[in-house]
Image (tube, rainbow, N blue to C red):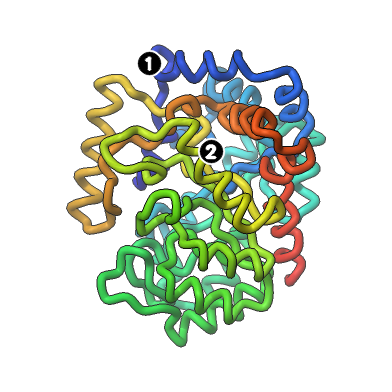
Amino acid sequence: MDRRQFSISLVAALAPLAVRAKDAEKSVSMRARALYNEALVLDCNSGPPMSDSLPLSAADLELVRGSGVTALKWSLGGINSGFRDTVAEIALVQRLIEVHPDYFLQVRIAADLERAKREQKLGLILSFESAEMFEGKLDSIDLFRNLGVRVMQLSYNRRSPFAAGVMEPQGGGLTPLGREAVARMNKVGVAIDVSHANPATTADVLAASAVPVVMTHAGSAAVHPHPRNKSDEQLRALAAKGGVVGIFNLPYLSASPHQPNVDDYLQHLEHVLHLVGEDHVGIGTDVGLEPFDTSPVGMAQFKKEEDERHAAGLAAPEEDRPTYVEGLNTPRRMEVIADQLLQRGYSEAATRKILGGNFARVFGQIWKAA
């Protein structure tokens, strides 16, 4: 189980932080609420409540419907799952859609995003963060694409047969096999995500790809230096390629031990908006629709999972705080962000782009390659 999967498995109905997040929801302006309800809202790294035992509970289904999210990109396969386990996880998602057809649909083409909004369902964009499931085989890209995986990364935090990640001590960029993978993903219409790529891999992918590239969940290194945050140079290059970056809700927004808050989040979002413009910025929270459980039980579980990541050498620096932003620990966190943008003078048109319009546009461009 990876950090995001752990986060989405928790419930925080009585946690004090969740109460404060509910207060933030209630304070949202009528203008922001109306815009949010009308907009195509796309969280480019999240996940719904999920269990090996289906059907989901009525409470989970109400959380999905009440979140107001149109679609989300769902990372499957964890950080190191092999081929067989990843296929089994995709099968479970297909079962989820089969059991709850009134609540979920799989996004395979760009038109499915508008369909999800129209039918008031949660669109699920299947994606990968790691590359272990490919087992070093280019043909696996085609197979997973045909199973509906539409966004893929070439490495997680360390090295894969294709590329180097942000925590790879030996550095490096795209390998020869990685260059072939970029060409194959371009050909079959898969979006390449460089959220976990190191600077060399990012530069190599941007140079090699014939279509825009995305960073679905990241922050700004100019605001807070961190390996998972992207430099102004990388962000400008991504935008020049036509790509979009999603700002995440992780503690890497601020220096330890400070738990980031809404102002910290907006500092990253606004910096990137001023840097690359409103057409190249979105949201990829990297947390599930369910609020993070800040109770003692929840925190103990979080510590256990973090100890495992550190022992495996997969943890990032400052990975010592829970995965939430104060004031955004709610299923309607993107509505709170929309309200903040409007309060700070951003237009309704720009806010709609950030909420999901930009990622919807770029996915439409990339998926057409098939």
Which amino acid, by three-letter code, is at mark 1? Ala
Number of the label disc, if any, that sits on residue 269:
none
> Spatial distance from mark 2 to mark 1, Cα to Cα?
24 Å
- Whether residues under marks 2 and 1 lie with C-beta atoms below 8 angstroms apart, the answer is no
Crowd class of label 1 (few under 14; some 14 to 19; many from 20; radius 10 Å): some
Q: Quadrant of residue 180?
A: bottom right
Q: Quadrant of residue 211?
A: bottom right
Establish if 174 lies above or below 251.
below
Q: Nearer the observer, disc 2 or disc 1?
A: 2
x then y, percent, for residue 25: 58, 19
Tell me if 283 is positioned left or right of 9 in this view. right
**Residue receiving disc 2:** 266
Counting residues from the N terminus, which is met first, the one under dot 2 or under dot 1?
Answer: 1
At horizontal 70% and vertical 66% (from top left) the residue drawn is 366
Between 351 and 159, the residue placed more toward the observer is: 351
At horizontal 71% and vertical 59% (from top left) the residue drawn is 362
**Residue receiving disc 1:** 15
Establish if 344 lies above or below 129.
above
